[in-house]
Image (cartoon, rainbow, N blue to C red):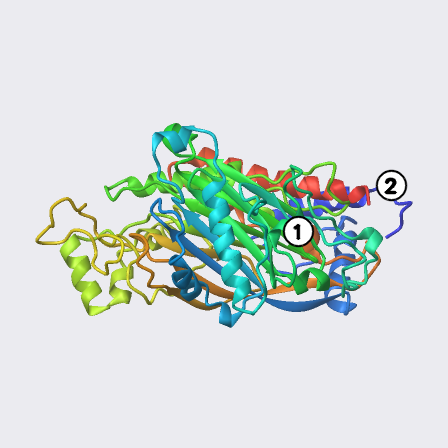
Amino acid sequence: MDDKNPKSSSGRFRNWFTRKHKQPDPYHLDDRSDGGEDEGDDFMEDVYVCSFEMDPCTSTNELRIFVGTWNVAGRSPVGSLAVDLDEWLKPQDAADIYVLGFQEIVPLKTRTVIGAEDPTEATNWNMLIGKTLNENFGCPWLTPMLNPIPSDNYHYVKIPASERRASFSGVSDATRMRGIRSRTPRQQPTLAGVGGSKYKLMASKKMVGVFISVWMKKELLRKYCVSNVKVSSVACGIMGYLGNKGSVSVSMSIEGTSFCFIAAHLASGEKTGDERRRNYQVSEIFRRTSFPRSAKDDDNPHPLTILGHDRIFWFGDLNYRLDLGDNSARNLIKKQDWKALQEFDQLRREQEDGGVFQGWREGNIEFAPTYKYSSSNCNRYSGGLPNRSGEKQRTPAWCDRILWYGKGVKLLSYFRSESKFSDHRPVSALFSTQIEVMKSANPRFVDKDTIVPNIMPPEQIGTSRNDEEGKSTLLSLIVKDTEASSTHMQKL
């Protein structure tokens, strides 16, 4: 591309995106022109040539990601829970990245909802997770108890370039993307796993009872460039702004591929219409989650919003219920007729009707509903006939779910674990996902998906049926994210 051309690359990109946005299938990579003669296509054609005709500009590597969600009913992690955690995480199968979302790590009482954040429980959970992941490989877990892992708002700090092996991207250390430094002096990288530990804490964020913890094999930090690790939280509970319900999210980039992980706890209730409250909260999380740029960021653009990422994973106690009578539901559970039971699942119905998560994917559910069990150490669902004194009458449901969006993701397994620690059972999914490793040092030749965020077409944006304003706001955020990225490119 000629630098003397008065038409800037960012301007060409915006024109290209505007025209492409009007096409019925914005993902069709062969549609390089809409039939016009605007020279703005030249810039994107250069990108396509790099991505597909001048191979190798990039190479594709594979990572295994374990995603798990668990509502722990306000209970603190006790020593005996180590066995349950070991069974849940199955560390003997060794994923490259562990992404764990928890709900109700503290009781949802007035004091915890409106009071100051207390990182104690998050720290305890991270200590137990780190111990489980590392000790199973014979690696010492030597984190000093006097300075435990900071957990309420921890960011990964990059490994110094002198310690990191040369990346496959071919980009020099001087131009590598940088990790976001922790915000307080006590948040030092050495506290996230020291000595010979195999897994390192990458990010951790707590909001009242919602908590996310992301761990990665340390060897990958020397093999790949991991950058722009950021966290975000959205409170949409009582009055729409308290943290008893909402989400905590992590954004990060591995080489040329961006990831977003969203752990959520949505509105409860099994009355007719409660699903619309959940739909609305999803749209609010989409609208209000942001990963703004800061002065410490590198020169490489990163996504500002959820939908700007290449690979997105949304998981948690989503609280969607079964539109089915209690007795009928329990009979189908007894027969283990999961296919028949799924026909009454609210989340599936809302997706089909376009109310939420349209275009997102979930694995086939071949396990029993995960909520609500009678009490700890019990395998019996709460309620039923005859109803036991003091028990809540709840129709069993698949409240705990894991969904994903984006290309280059393959589901390997989707399952529940059998810990009786709370009235929910943990749910997990193991994924194989591709990352794009840049090989060219020429910044002009970058992969298409690094420039154009993998976004949903406007007709597939998951919002409430009754929230058209939220839908238009989502679309504007996506366009803003894309324009900001292209403007940032102009400075390169």
Three-letter amino acid code of the residue under disc 1 = Thr
First-in-chain label (2 vs 1): 2
Q: Nearer the viewer, residue 139 or 129?
A: 139
Q: How many marks?
A: 2
Residue 272: where, in percent of width, then height?
A: 24, 42
Checking the image for residue 129, the label placed there is none
Q: Is residue 454 visible?
A: no
271 in relation to 341, above or below: above
Q: Quadrant of the C terminus?
A: top right
- In whole angstroms, how far apart are the C-alphas of marks 2 and 1? 50 Å
Residue 103: where, in percent of width, then height?
A: 40, 46
The image quadrant that residue 331 belongs to is: bottom left
* Pointer 2 with pointer 1, Cβ within 8 A: no
The residue at the point 35 percent across, 52 percent down is 347
Going by the image, does 481 lie left or right of 396?
A: right
Residue 188: where, in percent of width, then height?
A: 66, 45
Question: Which residue is disc 2 drawn over?
Answer: 6
67 in relation to 480, above or below: below
Q: Nearer the viewer, residue 12 or 463?
A: 463
Question: Which residue is disc 1 drawn over?
Answer: 190
Residue 142: where, in percent of width, then height?
A: 59, 57
149 in relation to 413, above or below: above
The residue at the point 77 percent across, 45 percent down is 299
The residue at the point 35 percent across, 38 percent down is 277
